[in-house]
Amino acid sequence: MAISSLPSVPDVPEKADRKHRKVEPVFWWMTVPTLVVFTLAIPIPAAIGIFYSFTNYIGVGKWHFLGLANYIAMFTDPQIRQSYIFTIGFSLVTVLAVNVISFLLAVGLTARIRAKVALRTVFVIPMVISGIVIAYVFQFLFSNSLPALGQALGVGWLKESMVTNPHLAWVAVVFVTAWQSIPGTLLIYIAGLMSVPEDVYEAADIDGASKFQQMTRITIPLVFSYVVINTILGFKGYLNAYDIIVGLTNGGPGTSTMSVAMNIVNGLTNGDYAYQMANATIFFIFTLIVSLLQLSLMRGRNK
């Protein structure tokens, strides 16, 4: 039989082929366990905690339904109000300081300077050290080394430990948090700056643009999406500040550096389970709203 006389095989539509395509078993083996672990670790405990926030549960034993009593009480609690004021103010100041310093360092570390690769390595070192270890090291420096230096130099404000001064303790928290956060933010800015084509700067040089004009009219607009990313990641991370504050000031002096996360954890371990779960629920809603606002601003900028 001639080849030309063979019946032609009809083309199978691509969509129909996808419908009949068998899902590989490895897909289910990789997906289902992860989904189960995630559900057991986050959504279910969160739902249980939200339920108990409407009760008088202390973590063990019996409980009674209270309705919105915990939520009403927390809005008149000065300690909770102070923790929110500190956390929001600390987050705003830290995210501003970290982004400004990281951006300027990234500009310097992407310039034509010697040993810039070695310098990048040095600046990234704080990123690999535990936050609680960093906090204890700086706590020793603020409590012993700096006061001794202040005594030797005769500088009055240095003679007293910053972490025991209610007016300066927050500065110490911001400084240590920024010291640890700058490396991660720096790496993102370096990646953004290296993605800007050199031709753009060469054209600006030909047109006579100064370095400041190139920074404000070329560099910052082209890496603005990286600024937004660092701002979102940083602000969300600082809202949950805990380990550095515990190691540095333990929320003191008094409650002047008590963060919301620290307030919640302390309450959960001191028999205020339901009350602090109400606090955690409000804090989750607040964080979610902040994240949605930041994402909407990012989408509006990219249009």
Image: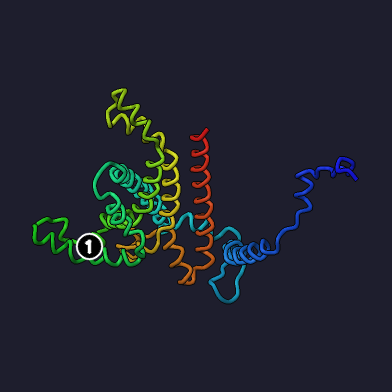
- Front residue of 67/225: it is 225
Position above or below: 297 against 269 = above
Left or right of 153 on screen, residue 178? right
Residue sticking out furthest to the bottom: 61
Q: Position of residue 95 (x, y in %)?
A: 37, 48
Left or right of 114 on screen, residue 88? right
Residue in the image at 21% along x and 62% along y: 161
- Looking at numbered disc 1 in the image, what kind of residue is underneath it? Phe
Residue in the image at 37% along x and 41% along y: 193
Residue in the image at 31% along x and 24% along y: 206
Q: Is residue 281 visible?
A: yes
Q: Position of residue 212 (x, y in %)?
A: 28, 31
Q: Position of residue 160 (x, y in %)?
A: 18, 61
Left or right of 59 on screen, residue 20? right
Looking at the image, what colour scheme do you see?
rainbow
Left or right of 27 on screen, residue 269? left
Residue sticking out furthest to the front: 1
Q: Position of residue 143 (x, y in %)?
A: 21, 65
- Which residue is the site of mark 1? 142
Q: Is residue 52 visible?
A: no
**Which corner quadrant of the image does residue 153 belong to?**
bottom left
- Front residue of 189/265: it is 189
**Which corner quadrant of the image does residue 169 belong to?**
bottom left
Position above or below: 196 against 140 = above
Position above or below: 251 against 107 = below
